[in-house]
Structure formats: structure tokens, C-alpha cells
Amino acid sequence: MIFWVWFLLEPVRLLLGYVGNLRERVAWLGGFWVLTIFPQLVAHFYFAVAQPIIWFNLPVETASSLIHLLLNIYQLVLGYDTVKRLVVKAMADFHLQPVDPDQALLVERL
């Protein structure tokens, strides 16, 4: 069942990342970020913490899941910082465009 959910969500995730990156759309990149991080965090948290309690688990599986969980948390922090910087850039680009037609004439005269 997890494979089918991944199979349906992966094209949507890739589309959000591709279009969001090319057009610098914050909402699209935010969706890409959420669909990238949270399914992986849940799965690796399950394999690192709950799987050894419920079922037999080899130590190498637990160690690799913990390493992958730490890398996903690092990706979560890095992705949040990147989206935050993109929001600041988008706000700066928006403020550079004059809204008032009289203000646009004033800017052209300068």
C-alpha cells in the first residue's frame, strides 16, 4: 500500500519541485518540501524506533535508519532555510515593482 501511495504522489512531488524551482513559486516549493520530507521522516522513525519493538530488527537496520533519519532532519532544516530565503527574495522583487501609476511616472523621471 505504501508503494502505491508513493507511486501516486511522486509525479506530483516532482512537478511541484520542477515548476516551483523554475518559476520561483514559494507555494509550489513548499509543497515539494512537505512531500519530500514528511513521508520519509515517518517511515524512518518507524523503522528506527517502532520496528525493533514490534518485530525482530538487525542492529545494522536500526543504525542505517537512524543515520537516514538524521540526514532527513538536516534536509528539513536546510530546506526550510532555503524556502525562507526565497520568500525574502520574492518579497524584495515584489516591492521593486511600483503599484501606483503616479509612482511609476516618478520612478521613470528619476
Image (cartoon, rainbow, N blue to C red):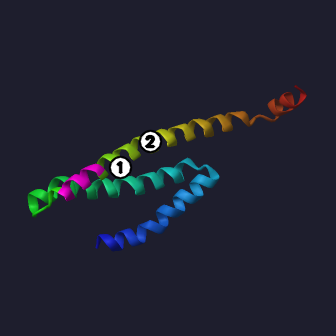
The secondary element bearing badge 2 is classed as helix
Q: Going by the image, does 51 lie left or right of 64?
A: left
Residue on which disc 2 sits: 78
Residue at the far front: name it. Answer: 60
Marks 1 and 2: in contact by CB < 8 Å?
A: no
Q: Going by the image, does 84 lie left or right of 96?
A: left
At 52% across and 51% down in the image, what residue appears?
Answer: 29
Mark 2: give few (<14), some (14-19) or many (20+) Cα within 10 Å.
few
User: Label 1 sits on what residue type?
Assistant: Asn
Image height check: is 94 above or below 17? above
Q: Going by the image, does 50 lie left or right of 89?
A: left
Residue at the far right: name it. Answer: 109
Image height check: is 9 above or below 109? below
Which quadrant of the figure contains the C terminus? Answer: top right
Q: Main secondary structure of the magenta part?
A: helix
Residue at the far top: name it. Answer: 110
Q: Nearer the viewer, residue 86 or 103?
A: 86
Q: CA distance from mark 2 to mark 1?
A: 10 Å
Residues drawn in magenta: 60-67
Question: In the image, residue 13 lies at what x, y percent?
Answer: 47, 62
Q: Going by the image, does 94 lie left or right of 76?
A: right
